[in-house]
Image (cartoon, rainbow, N blue to C red):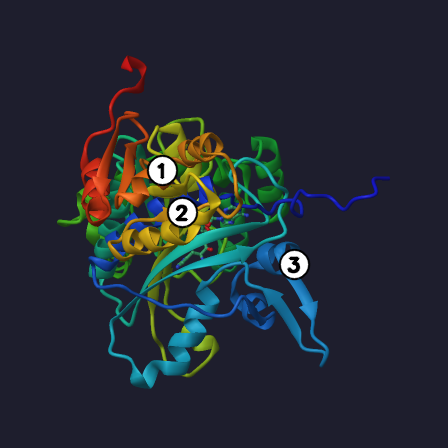
Amino acid sequence: MSRFLPTAPYRGTRDFLPDEMSVRQQVFSRLYEAVERYGYVRYDGPILESADIYEAKSGREIADQQLYSLTDRAGRRLALRPEMTPSVARMIAGHAGELQFPVRWYSHVNCHRYERPQRGRVREHWQINVDVFGSDSPNCEIEIFQVIHDMMASLGATRDMYVLRANDRILLESLLVDVIGIPHEKVRDVSSILDRWAKYPREQLLDSALQLEISEQQFERIEVALKSDESLLPEMPAETLERSPLARILAGPGRDLVVFDPSIVRAFEYYTATVFEVFDTNPANSRSLFGGGRYSDLVGLFSDQRIPGIGFGMGDVTLMDFLDTHGLLPTPKPECDVAVMPVEEELLPVVRDIAGELRAAGYRTVVPLESRKLGKELKRADRSGARAGVIVGPDDWQRGMVGVRDLAGREQQTVPREEVVAAVAQILSSPRPDRTTI
Ligand code: HAM
């Protein structure tokens, strides 16, 4: 056994070093801007919640297998949140009296699930949650779908790179009951087989269906139905189509936003109507990128008010895989813009003053902390990605002058001390020369 503790983080969790963090920040800030352009405002909440809020309506997989649960010193059963939807429903219920509905909220939160780590799945991930509360109108679906497309566009993704697929549990239930003849009380169990449809071999799915006393013939009809498109809709009762927000969208002006896919089920029990997922069109990422749906009565867990909600959670892991696959990841930003360096240690106070001026002008500016040779400092500045170097030498300084160097082009000029900020500004705003030609 090693004398040292491991430096790797706990299995399925991740460290983010600054370069990766810089990429992530650029991605997320574009997403926040896209969401805020629709009037969504950001909220947050605790990572620890009462375990009850997941056990009630999130579904057995989350509650029984994926929850990181603990008991506090007073014996309360808690969990690290595996998702944000029950928490936001709790907040909406608790503040309904003060809120003006419809409420448009978003958050960016860390979620924990005890899953087997694999491509697209880890044990802690970040989710941007975007939800609307307080309206049953299909206009909510339309807006949420538009937000999704705008978020993707803000990252440079075009519509051929991904597809937004949606279903409606109202339609699904009607398909199973009215069209295929499955008894009402079996809908939930059959839906959970459908949720596993793409991931399991046919025999296993058929076996599960037979155990529920679904006939082989009915199973085959489900198979056909799942492969079909909107041609399925006219077979459903008019009353069902009227109740389904998705069917109304597919028949109207929101039509181009989404593709109907009767095989989308989603695992959470709280969804009551529309369910949707976004997929990469590149087969490198077969798992859905993110998803969500409409939940008519989740807020009802916390109060007697019926406040419907609809929204989605966009996960960072699958999103970054998508951006990587399509060459859309931004490059990390350099550590700083300017490095100010003394030729002799005695000049460090001067260097600090000049750095202060550059910072006040808005430039990210570093100064040495250790006394080192100028050559080493220049190398360090170069590696840090700084574009400009300010060099303070004793002879120049006696004349009130300093050296200002373009670290990309290597040209250096000597300027009066008062002109340092202007000289740096000029370097930073000029295009980076191609180093290979120098
Ligand atoms: P979800 O589909 O469980 O939905 O998670 C949303 C997204 O979070 C997934 O599509 C995926 O991108 C990411 N995600 C989930 N689990 C993991 C994991 N173990 N590793 C990496 N990424 C993961 C929900 O959580 C719903 N509460 C979303 C929602 C919001 N529905 C309505 N509003």
**Which residue is more in the foreground, 105 or 211?**
105
Residue on which the image places disc 1: 386
Q: Quadrant of residue 79?
A: bottom right
Distance of mark 3 from mark 2, alpha carbons?
A: 51 Å
**Which quadrant is home to the N terminus?**
top right
The residue at which mark 3 appears reads as 64
Task: Examine the rendered structure and indicate whether residue 68 appears above or below residue 262.
Answer: below
Residue 97 sits in quarter: bottom left
How many other residues sit within 10 Å of disc 1, few (<14), some (14-19) or many (≥20)?
A: many
CB contact under 8 Å: marks 2 and 1: yes
> For the residue marked with disc 1, what is the amino acid?
Ala
Q: Nearer the viewer, residue 113 or 135?
A: 113
* Residue 393 visible in the current orientation: no
How far apart are the alpha carbons under marks 2 and 1? 9 Å
Q: Amino acid at mark 2?
A: Val
In this view, the residue farthest toward the left is 253
Q: Percent from the top left, x then y, of residue 397?
A: 31, 44
Dot 1 and dot 3 residues touching (CB under 8 Å): no
Residue under the image location 62 percent in, 39 percent down? 207
